[in-house]
């Protein structure tokens, strides 16, 4: 019995030492720049909005299939400047950054659950520049 727990602890410790399983996953916070904020899990344009999900066309690949993301009551929605966003304000065509509840999309659920959604509005002045990330935009 004890050897089984020691074995599990050894595997966990080994993955931490190799950097495979214990990295911090820092989510963005409204109005605060947190050092080490993870890059978005997905970013792109909203294709569809339902009461519980959004469908996103990822930016990463031209031929990428849309990704459905669960937006729950626990999901935080705010602008890049930290202002609160109501779920009903999400619109088709909006550009969004989304962070899943886990660094791994597999552990985030099916469909993956969003922890944070940062939408951008239709104004061209309120669009992220290529390569921008929260806490990394020097403008």
Image: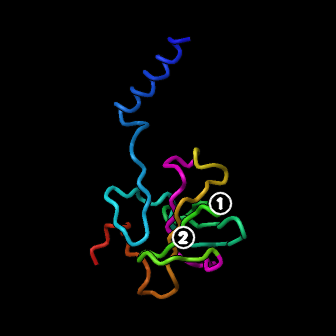
Q: Residue at position x 48%, y 62% from top?
A: 60
Q: Would residue 31 appear left or right of 47 to someone viewing this image?
A: left
Q: Secondary structure at mark 1?
A: strand
Give whichever of discs 1 and 2 has the lower sequence position.
1
Q: Residue at position x 48%, y 17% from top?
A: 7
Q: Would residue 65 appear left or right of 21 to someone viewing this image?
A: right
Q: Percent position (x, y) of residue 110?
A: 67, 50
Residue 25 covered by magenta stretch: no
Q: Secondary structure at mark 2?
A: strand
Count the marks.
2
Q: Which residue is mark 1?
A: 70
Q: Percent position (x, y) of residue 131?
A: 36, 67
Q: Are marks 1 and 2 in contact (CB under 8 Å)?
A: no
**Residue extending farthest left:** 138
Specify start and end residues of the magenta stretch as a single range.
Answer: 88-105
Which labelled disc corresponds to residue 77? 2
Quarter of the image with the C terminus is bottom left
Image vertical order of residue 41 relative to residue 15, above or below: below
């Amino acid at each position: 019995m004890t050897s089984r727990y020691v074995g599990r602890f050894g595997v966990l410790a080994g993955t931490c030492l190799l950097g495979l399983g214990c990295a911090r996953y820092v989510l963005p916070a409204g109005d605060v720049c947190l050092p080490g904020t993870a890059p978005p899990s997905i970013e792109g344009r909203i294709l569809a909005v339902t009461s519980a999900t959004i469908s996103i066309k990822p930016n990463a690949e031209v031929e990428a299939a849309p990704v459905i993301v669960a937006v729950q009551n626990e999901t935080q929605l705010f602008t890049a400047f930290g202002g609160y966003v109501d779920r009903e304000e999400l619109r088709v065509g909006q550009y969004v950054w989304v962070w899943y509840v886990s660094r791994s999309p597999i552990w985030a659920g099916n469909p993956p659950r969003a922890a944070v959604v940062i939408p951008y509005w239709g104004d061209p002045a309120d669009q992220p520049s290529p390569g921008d990330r929260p806490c990394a935009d020097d403008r």
